[in-house]
Amino acid sequence: MTQADEKTTVVVVGGGVAGLALGTFLLRSGIPCVVLEKNSREYVEQRQRAGSLDGRGVRMLRDWGVGEAVEGHGDGPSDVVLPLIVHGEQRAWRMDTDEEGAGAFIPQQVRVRNLVRIFLRDGGDLRFGAEDVTLEGLGTEQPRVRYRDDRGAKAIDCAFVAGADGFHGVSRTAIPDGFLSCHSHEFGYAWLTVLAEVPADPLAVMAVHSRGFAAQITRGPNASRIYLQCPVDDTIGDWPDERIWEELGARFAAPVPRGPIATKQVVPLRGVVFSPMRYGRLFLLGDAAHLISPMSAEGMSLALHDAEALARAVVHQVEKDDPSALENYSDTCLAHVWERQAAAVWMTDAMHDSGDASYRGEFRKQVALANLENLVQPRPA
């Protein structure tokens, strides 16, 4: 193999929360790394995504000295009382502080913007517009990552590759067929997800209704994401703007402020786990390795857990010449992933089965309603 253009310790493929967090943790540990992101900086800093982060994730960022990534943006902590409308009755859902402390509720594009700024401020090597990424030699001691930017083709030799480029990225596809096992669970219904140019006030409100689950959650001061439970075979053509607003109002049992709708998408709810999360010198993290039901709001927290586990394992290898943490990376992360998947299935079933009895029957509906009572504050005396 001819000499590459350059060499580093870790190449991180993907400049989302998982990749940027891993790059920041490595940089602050003195480990050289390069982060490759196929999109422009403007695109990744404006891309709308969910913004909930659990208490462990907030504490982790603070422990690494990057607490500013989740602080000071006015969107408040997640340990607040949020409206939950159960069959037209106003209830309250307290997203309690966990054993790690309070979480945070900040739109993901704000968090990405903060992590980009922190990484670059610390001297990190972040390359936007890195297209046509290919991974070579993953089963050797010196993998090579090739990519192309506006200045031509490049190649980087490294000791490790981190695949943080999402569910549809190139990293997982670089693993030979038959090596990974894919475990999935289909919930049997979908969410119509709508990005609307209207603020969410309060920051999040959810509803359980006989017509299906509904939610409206902030995506910044002037936008919100709307979720409406629907059949998996629905298309966006089934949902003209007027129907969306009427359905949201019906499930919320009250009129809702309207605004321009920017995007619509039908997303089947599912959980997916790929195992193992490692092949040779390639380590998968975040959505490249697993998807979790969006009802759990734990996708970002799982990504950060993977990033920290991999960062500490690489540091252990580099500083102590001990590969044990890297060898255990997949098992360590998967134990946590399956624990959170179990909680996500419970939460998703409680919120959706307690609405429409026609889907799973009255027995499951009543069980879900009983479970739902464990999530909400007691009714006023």
Image: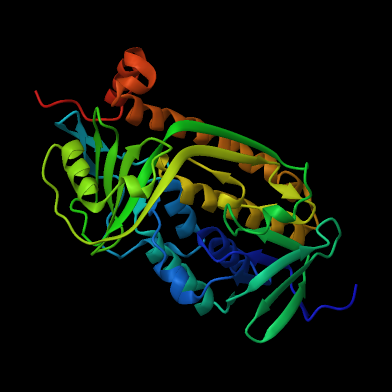
Quarter-wise, where is residue 147 in the image? bottom right
Q: Is residue 270 left or right of residue 207?
A: right
- Decide: is 367 above or below 330: above
Q: Position of residue 13 (x, y in %)?
A: 64, 64
Name the residue furthest top.
363
Can residue 102 be seen in the rendering of this structure? no
List x then y, in percent, for residue 278: 72, 48
Q: Nearer the viewer, residue 266 or 84?
A: 266
- Which residue is more in the foreground, 230 or 278? 230
Q: Quadrant of residue 15?
A: bottom right
Q: Is residue 313 visible?
A: yes
Q: Quadrant of the N terminus?
A: bottom right
Left of 347 or right of it: where is 22?
right
Q: Quadrant of the C terminus?
A: top left
The total number of labels drawn is 0
Looking at the image, which residue is at 19% across and 26% down? 378
Position of 237 with respect to 57 (left or right) is left
Q: Position of residue 347 (x, y in %)?
A: 39, 31
Q: Residue at x 82, y 78 (%)?
A: 4
Q: Is residue 71 left or right of residue 247?
A: right
Q: Is residue 58 above or below residue 66?
A: above
Q: Residue furthest right?
A: 1
